[in-house]
Image: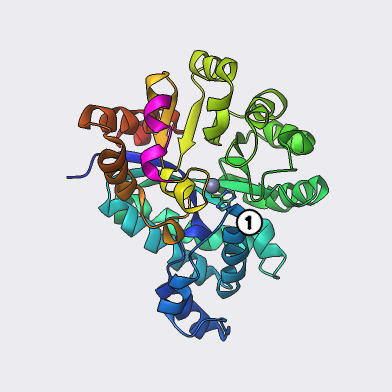
Amino acid sequence: MPIPKAELHLHIEGTLEPELAFALAARNGVQLPYADTEELRKAYLFEDLQSFLDLYYGLMAVLRTEADFEKLADAYLARAAAQGVRHAEIFFDPQAHIARGVGMGTVVEGLGRALDRSAERHGISTRLIMCFLRDQSAESAMATLEAAKPYLHRITGVGLDSAEVGHPPAKFAAVYEAAGALGLRKVAHAGEEGPAAYVSEALDVLGVERIDHGLRCMEDPDLVERLVRERVPLTLCPLSNVRLRAVDILEEHPLPRMMAAGLLCTLNSDDPAYFGGYVGDTFHAVHEALGIDPEGLRELARNSFEAAFLDGSAADEAL
Ligand code: ES4
Ligand code: ZN
C-alpha cells in the first residue's frame, strides 16, 4: 500500500500524456506536429524551464471542450489514486486557454465535472488553484481574476507560474490583494529558476501561504531560518528540478539538507506527464537516489496534509 499523501503542486495541463494528446487531437481535428506518441515523447528532452513551457503551451491546442478537461482531470485522479494520493490541490492556467478562445467556464466546469466525482470514484478530495502567467502583464492577470468571478465557488486559491526570471512577485501585488479580498488562498512559484529574493518577496508583498518550489532559498541562510520559524510549506518537485536542470542529477538534490534544516518540505510531481513520474514515483525516487528512509517519507507525507488547504471539516477529517 502506498503511503497516503496530499499532492499540492500539480499543473493539470502537465498531466497530458502523449496518448491522450493524440486521442483529443483526433477528436477535435487538431493537427499535432509529431508523427506519433513515440516522436512526441522524444520531444520531452528539455534544457530549461522555457524549453519545457514552449511544448507545454503548444500541446494545450488539443484541449477544447468541457469533456476534454473532464477527461484530463479524471485520468490524472485515477493515476494519483493508484499512488496513494488522498487529496489533490490542482493548478490550472486559464490565460493559456482564454488566449486560444477556450473560455474560463469551459475550463472550470470541465475540470469541475471530474472533481465533483473524485471523492466517490477515486477517494481523493480536491481543490482548484487558478494560476496567473507571470510572463504576461499584471493587467491580464487582473482581467483573469475578473473572468473567474462567476466560478469562485469552485476556486480555492490563486497561484503564479510560467517563466520566473525577470517577472518578480511584486509585479502582481495588486491582483493578489484583490484575490485576498475575494477570500482566495494564495501561493506562488518562487525560487525555481529565480533567486531566493523572489521567495521573500512572494511572502512579504503577495502574502502567500506556501511557496511552490522554493529550492533556491538554500542560497540564503537567513531566509531558511525564517521559513523554518514561520513554518512556510515548500512544495518541492525533485523530478521536475532534474528535467528542467535546476539541479544536475537527483543525487545532488538539496531535499535531505532542506529536511535537516527543519524546512516544511512536501513532495509533488509538478507536470508528471513531462517529467517522468507521478507523486508516488517521486517518493520512490528520493528514497532510491537520496536515501530518504521510511521515517523521512512518512514525514514528507504528513507535511503534505499539514500544508494542504483543508479546513478540518467533518468531510475533510474523513480523509
Ligand atoms: C511549470 Cl515546472 C513549472 N514552472 C513554472 N511554471 C509552470 N507551469 C507548468 N509547469
Ligand atoms: Zn509548477
Asked if 88 appears above or below 109 in the picture, the reply is: above
Taking the image as drawn, is residue 285 in sight?
yes
In the rendered structure, which amino acid carries the disc numbered 1? Gln
Which residue sits at x=32%, y=33%? 301
Is the CB of mark 1 within 8 Å of ligand 1? no
Q: Main secondary structure of the magenta part?
A: helix
Q: Is residue 87 left or right of residue 296?
A: right
What count of labels does the image hold? 1
Residue receiving disc 1: 50
Whole-percent x, y for residue 3 in the image: 24, 39
Whole-percent x, y for residue 282 in the image: 34, 46
Whole-percent x, y for residue 166 in the image: 75, 43
Which residue sits at x=30%, y=50%? 281
**Residue situated in front as seen by the camera: 178 or 57:** 57
Residue at the extreme right of the image, as rendered: 139
Was residue 252 drawn as part of the magenta stretch in this picture?
yes
Asked if 160 appears above or below 79 in the picture, the reply is: above
Which residue sits at x=37%, y=35%? 316
Whole-percent x, y for residue 111 in the image: 50, 59
Taking the image as drawn, is residue 214 in sight?
no
Q: Is residue 145 left or right of residue 72?
A: right
Asked if 266 appears above or below 161 in the picture, the reply is: above
Q: Secondary structure at mark 1?
A: helix
In terms of image quadrants, where is residue 93?
Answer: bottom right
Quadrant of the frame with the C terminus: top left
Magenta stretch? Answer: 249-258
Was residue 207 drawn as part of the magenta stretch in this picture?
no
Applied colour scheme: rainbow
Which residue sits at x=51%, y=13%? 229
**Residue situated in front as seen by the camera: 87 or 79:** 79
